[in-house]
Image (tube, rainbow, N blue to C red):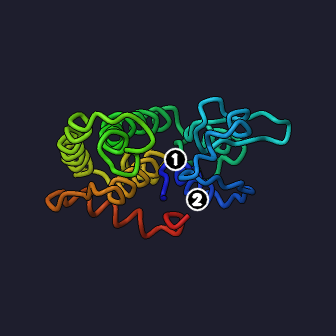
Amino acid sequence: MPAPNPRRVRIFLAEKGIEVPEAPLNLMAREHKSPEHRARNPLGQVPTLELDDGTCISETVSICRYFESEHPDPPLFGRTAKEVAQVDMWIRRVEFVLMQPVGNYWRHAHPRTAALLTQYKDFGESNVERYKDAQRWFDGQLADSAFIAGETFSMADICALSTVDFADWIGLPLEAGNANLTSWRRRVAERPSAGA
């Protein structure tokens, strides 16, 4: 399963040229909910970065900010205060506007999650239109810029790409009329890091 959150970190690391040893967990076998993993991340989510001193960092953006601080080039969170703020703003917009309806559909309407939790199918299905609206909004925002947060590839693009690719995998494709969004996706998907 192409889980979007671990993929965000893999793409980020590939852009930076950083190699980190991985300890893959089988999500379908619920290994991320094991006592061993919950000792690292009490929420039982992936990814989790375990440092040499035993500190564990979870949440994709937090993990990537850690690596950005350690390896500032190339900058993926911006260089100036204005760029950093804009990238952060767009990451939040990707998560709340684009990812939220995808996550709600996955959790409440997709057959793969039906056996894992209580679903509210009507609510899940209602997120299909919310995702289409989000696509149209992002399409409009991309009319004047090459990337999500402006003219430079950033963490916002990584978050958005992992979202639209995961959405496509669960049966929520990009709508044909969103030419700017489609063009953006093609550009970022051509980057070597997108295969991470």
Placement of 191 over or under 174, stated as above or below: below
Q: In this view, which residue lies farthest toward the front?
A: 115
Compared across the picture, whether 8 is left or right of 65 comes to left
Q: Secondary structure at mark 2?
A: helix
Mark 2 — residue? 15
Residue at the (29%, 44%) spot, across then down: 109
Give coordinates of residue 146: x percent, y percent.
Answer: 33, 56
For label 1, count other residues whose C-alpha is less than 10 Å away and answer few (under 14), some (14-19) or many (20+). some
Asked if marks 2 and 1 touch (Cβ < 8 Å), the reply is no
Q: Which residue corresponds to mark 1? A: 5
Kind of residue sitting beneath label 2: Glu
Of residues 49 and 43, the one drawn nearer to the viewer in this rendering: 43
Residue in the foreground of this view, choosing between 105 and 137: 105
- In the rendered image, the residue lying farthest to the right is 53
* Mark toward the viewer: 2 or 1: 1
Apparent side of residue 116 relative to residue 120 in the rendered image (left or right): right
> Could you tell which of marks 2 and 1 lies nearer the N-terminus?
1
Instruction: Locate the C terminus by quadrant.
Output: bottom right
In the image shown, does 60 or 114 lie closer to the viewer? 114
Horizontal side of 129 relative to 62 (left or right) equals left
Give the total number of marks visible in the rendering: 2
Residue occupying the point 37% across, 34% down:
118
Residue at x 73%, y 33% (from the top left corner): 39
Instruction: Examine the rendered structure and indicate whether residue 76 appears above or below residue 108.
Output: below
- Name which quarter of the figure residue 164 lies in: bottom left
Instruction: Report the side of 114 relative to 133 (left or right).
Output: right
Which residue, as the protein is rendered here, is positioned at the far top? 42
The kind of residue on which mark 1 rests is Asn
